[in-house]
Image (cartoon, rainbow, N blue to C red):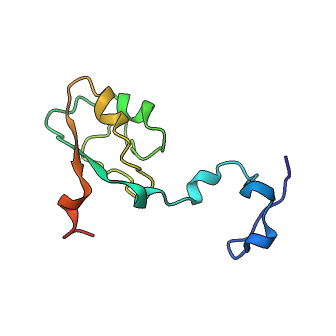
Amino acid sequence: MSDRVYSKTAGWQDMAAGGVIPQAGNAEEYATGGWRTFRPVRDDEKCIDCLQCWIYCPDNAIKVIDQKVSGIPYDLVHCKGCGVCAAICPVKCIEMKPETDFEDEN
């Protein structure tokens, strides 16, 4: 693995074969929310702040403040809408809604 650090203006010619980005924590730089077709919507009144959604989210799109997720919006820049959070929620307070329901907000 290379310790090479790419600048934000690096072109494809500057990248390693296969597009490998060797820096740790590089997923933070990828905005993957544009792939989403479903958006998680949490009912904060039902949420028990068990943090299961935070533990299982593969994209670190659920933020925690003071050991709570309720009242805190999702990181929609990174949420791909996979639905793991809704599937794992023990009180079913997360509903996956079609992204088209939010066209006026985008």
What is the quadrant of residue 49 in the picture? top left
- Between residue 106 and residue 72, name the one nearer to us: 106
Direction from residue 26 to residue 93 in the image, left or right: left
Instruction: Residue 41: give x, y in percent of width and height.
Output: 23, 46
> Which residue is depicted at the point 79% across and 72% down?
13
Callout count:
0
Q: Position of residue 77 (x, y in %)?
A: 42, 59
Image quarter in which the C terminus is found: bottom left
Q: Where in the figure is residue 56, as x and y percent of width and height?
A: 43, 31
- The residue under the point 34% across, 50% down is 74
Residue that extends furthest to the top in the rendered view of this protein: 90
Residue 32 location (% of width, % of height): 48, 57
Q: Which residue sits at x=42%, y=47%?
A: 61
| Residue that appears at 64% across and 49% down | 25
Among all residues in the image, which is located at the extreme left? Answer: 45
In the image, taking residue 71 as reference, residue 19 lies left or right, namely right
Q: Please determine whether, in this image, residue 82 is positioned above or below residue 37.
A: above
80 shown above or below 51: below
